[in-house]
Amino acid sequence: MKRAGFTTVWLPVALLLPQLSIIAIFFYWPAGWAVQSSFYLQDPFGFGSTFVGLDNYTDLGRNTEYLRIAWFTVIYTCLVTFFSLAIALLLAVKADKVIRGARTYRTLLMWVYAVAPPVAGFMGIMFFDQRTGPITDLFQTVGSDFKLGVNYTDTATAMVIAAVWKQIPVNFIFFLSGLQSIPKSVNEAAIIDNRSATGRFWQVTFPLLAPTTFFLLIINITYALFDTFGIIDTLLKGEPGNNPMTLVYKVFLDGFRGNDLGGSSAQSVILMVLVLILTVFQFRLIERRIHYT
Amino acid sequence: MKLLNLSAAALVTSFVGQAAFAETEITWWHAMGGQLGETVNEVAEKFNASQDDYKIIPVFKGSYEETLTSGIAAFRAGEHPNVIQVFDAGAATVIGAKGATIPVQDLLADNGIAFDINDYIAGVRYFYADSDGKMIGMPFNSSTPIMYYNAGALAKAGVEPPKTWEEFQSVTAPALKDAGYIPLSQSHLPWIFTENFFSRHNLQFASNNNGYDGADTQIMVDNPAIKAHFTALTEWKDKGLFEWYGTGWGDNAKPFEDGEVAMWLGSSGSFGGLLKKDLGFEFSATMLPYWEAVTTEPTQTFIGGAALFAMSGKSEEENKATAEFFKFLTNADTQYFWHQATGYVPITEAAYEVAKADGHYEKFPAAEVGIEQLTLPAGDFTRGYRMGFYVQIRDVMNREYGRILTGETSVDDAFATIQEEANQLLERFAKTQG
């Protein structure tokens, strides 16, 4: 048996170099800086700085507001991930069954994907505006006094809805292609064993979709944690006040608005560690139970 | 071929042109968007047209916070502008970083331009100065919170604009409510109802002479007088005498502009914008009310808005250009133009005299309210405040005030929290200066 390979070491190294240098320059280097500056309190202009050890971290641990934001981030991520996956799956299952006008129907479901997060946030503002928003009016007809930007829960609701709405098309595309790649014969065989469509879905289709779902789960958690920044920023209009926010928004506020480089660096290091743990956890625990076809 | 010749000729002329008029170019980063931004461009054009040696290029960098952050990032990369506009809450950051800027007083003196701090109106002299009273930043768009009112609404309710909060709660607000209006909204709780609350009543806002005398400052916001004010505010809100539409500036201004709210606390710098919006009702303004229960001799308020700082690390030629621009900016005609177009107060006595002589205040009495308020008698604590990480301190205030007004927390708890978190931030800031 002949193994294909390189004759010298240098060629593969040279081929890898562009990729590696990009990772080093744009990821490891700034990450290293973040870790380093998280141990300092420094003047924003770069004149003075004091080594404070772990103070930036312990200050965060004592700050009740930071803990409150962390807790909100957890709930927010769960809600956004769950609803954007669940609704997309429902839509994909239904779209999969449509035969007449399928293409139009699918395109209509997908095109929200092209909307940029800040635009999604802006649309959220228009729909949920305290005084002129149609959804606010809708809430009012059922007796709820919805106040975006005033009431904590109301703002949180608007954030979740805007974030879910924006993410559904991505999930929809993946779920639909996942469903279409399930062989017809499997379904036909299942029909003989189980006459209940719901039963068949949970026992046959859903397990076969598991690789897609697992992939989307990771994508959606990352989306909720990080990529909803644009939506949150637009909905808060740059003035957080008493409104909810996620951890990544807090990093931005303290670092870019408040010029607290040390504190903000400590927060980004915490987020880096969080993502690391999450990734390891997901691959170790969940991937084992999934069968790739 | 013809085209090529033409462009070659153009190239040559442009080189010659540059050689003939060796203008020194300087850049100016600012945070004045929309209508204000256009006025800034006009000021720059006027300066460029006034002489041939220097050219200033204004660049809009977003909000006040964004402008300061871009300036800091650019400074660290050595690509900063000559002039940067920094707002009141960022003053401690930029002044604390000694070496980032050239004190405006030194810059003018070094370039042979006469400077006398007494030429400036009393209220703006020392806010952007160091503890010895040396002016560090050149006050630019200086504003102060005043109370705008819908004249028609007040006439309908049969009331006069209130002078004190006692008058507001017992006479003005109930009458306005009966006339079908929401009596009051405001656009910036930390600025109007906190910083200027302390100034208007001459109360100490922070230790170390409101923070001017050192970085180891402690905030003194947990004060019975301001707690009583916020308690009153929640009562007014419950009775429908006051409404709060969130933390955003515009969210609270809009209901006034739409005629739903009868009186609105905003900035004297909002005047130009309101005038151009053609609100469909006659509006005017009066001074920020005070509590007679706290003081019978109310004092002047702080200047808000922002100042221009000359950044260091530039050539002498460019610094000279910056100094000339500051000289141009502070002359009476430029100031009067700026004052008329925007509503920001003129910063020199001379400009104020020009505006008076021109009959500006007979036409628009509201335009004079800000400057009158800034020239009221001073007190021990009316000069200003200097606290680091103040942007975050304001965020903490906004958060806790929002919680008070939505009933999530009590006034006592909120002020205790603000005091505690603000002092932690101040302690952290003191370490950055080490």
Image: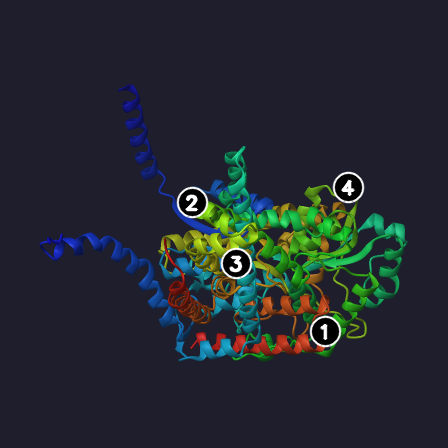
Res. A81 mark:
3
User: Which of the two marks, 1 or 3, is nearer to us in this view?
Assistant: 3
Residue at disc 3, secondary structure: helix
Q: CA distance from mark 4 to mark 1?
A: 35 Å
Rendered position, B330 above or below B100: above
Determine whether label 2 and label 4 are within 8 Å by CB. no
Q: Does the residue at mark 2 contact the one at mark 3 (Cβ under 8 Å)? A: no
Residue denoted by label 2 = A185
Q: Chain of mark 2?
A: A
Is residue A146 rendered to the left or right of residue B329? right
In three-dimensional space, the C-alpha distance between marks 1 and 3, rounded to whole angstroms, equals 44 Å
Looking at the rendered structure, whether the residues under marks 1 and 2 are on a common chain is answered as no
* Image: B290 above or below B66: below
Left or right: B220 in relation to B112: right
Task: Judge depth for marks 2 and 3 and give the one in front.
Answer: 2
Task: Provide the residue designation for mark 1.
Answer: B226
Q: CA–CA distance between discs 1 and 2?
A: 75 Å
Whichever of callouts 4 and 1 sits on the residue coming sooner in the sequence is 1
Does the rendering let one see residue B125? yes
Tell which subunit mark 4 falls on. B
Depth check, mark 1 against mark 2: the one in front is: 2
For the residue labelled by badge 1, is the local secondary structure a helix, a strand or a loop?
Answer: helix
Residue B277 vertical placement versus A144 (above, below): above
Visible in this render: residue B60?
no
Q: Amino acid at mark 2?
A: Ser
Residue A100: x %, y % from top left: 54, 33
Badge 1 sits on which subunit? Answer: B
